[in-house]
Amino acid sequence: MKLARIALAAAFVLIAGCGTSPKERYYTLSAAEAPAGADQTKPAFTVAVGPATLPAVVDRFQIVLQLDANRVEVNDLHRWAEPLRRAIPRVVAANLARELPAARVVVYPPSGSEVADYRVFLDVKRFESEAGKAVTLEVAWSIRRGAAGELRTGNSVVRESVAGTGYELLVAAHSRALDTISREIADALRAMSR
């Protein structure tokens, strides 16, 4: 009798263990690392980055995998820790701060009554993730000097390979692609600030 109870209890434990749902995982985009000892003198100009617009298919918390030209997979267990429309300007701003040590770079809207000398707008046309293959980012960006000054535009398309199938590798590849796009924007800002 005692042995039967133990076997029954073990069966319940085993069944309960099988009934637990998989754990959600959260990911965040990251900026490239800044060199140590960056100069923190008074900035020569201020840059505000944002807002960013995105295709509706990826403007969600779940990570979206591109399966083919007409099919995607939305994964409820692998999610962004923050909305991409906030994460992308944050990462681009951090990358620009690294690339432009003479500038003060903030995410739009700047705090207080501060007015930025330059404003960077980001229109994300493609934010594609192909598991085990690559990510593709296409961003149409524009930089405006002051409220109604000079306008410079660009369109950056970056494809980053992914060596493996983990979601961490996809997210890291998106971060690298944003770094490349940020460098292109930084080049345009350097030219405009001369």
Image (tube, grey):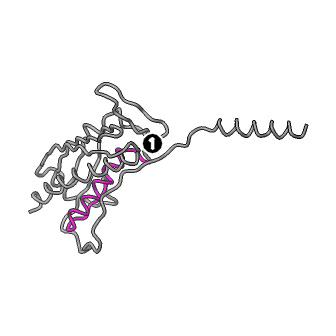
Q: Residues within 10 Å of mark 1 (few under 14, many from 20)?
A: many
Q: Quadrant of residue 167?
A: top left
Q: Nearer the viewer, residue 37 or 100?
A: 37
Q: Position of residue 166 (x, y in %)?
A: 41, 44
Q: Quadrant of residue 114?
A: bottom left
Rendered-image quadrant of the N terminus: top right
Residue at the location (26% across, 37% down)?
126
Residue at the location (67% across, 40% down)?
17
Instruction: State the count of labels.
Output: 1
Given the current orientation, which residue lies at the most extreme right position?
A: 1
Given the current orientation, which residue lies at the most extreme front position?
A: 3
Give the vertical position of 60 relative to 32 (above or below).
above
- Which amino acid is tagged 1? Arg
Q: Position of residue 72 (x, y in %)?
A: 36, 29
Q: Position of residue 85 (x, y in %)?
A: 34, 44
Q: Nearer the viewer, residue 127 or 135?
A: 135
Give the vertical position of 40 relative to 68 (above or below).
below
Is residue 185 left or right of 4 when viewed as pictured?
left
Q: Nearer the viewer, residue 192 or 33?
A: 33
Residue at the location (20% across, 64% down)?
100
Decide whether residue 97 is among the magenta residues.
yes
Is residue 169 left or right of 154 when viewed as pictured?
right
Q: Position of residue 49 (x, y in %)?
A: 26, 53
Given the current orientation, which residue lies at the most extreme top position?
A: 70
- As helix, strand or loop, the secondary structure at mark 1 comes to strand
Q: Main secondary structure of the magenta part?
A: helix
Residue at mark 1: 79
Rendered-image quadrant of the C terminus: bottom left
Residue at the location (40% across, 31% down)?
73
| Residue segment shown in magenta | 82-107
Is residue 185 left or right of 23 when viewed as pictured?
left
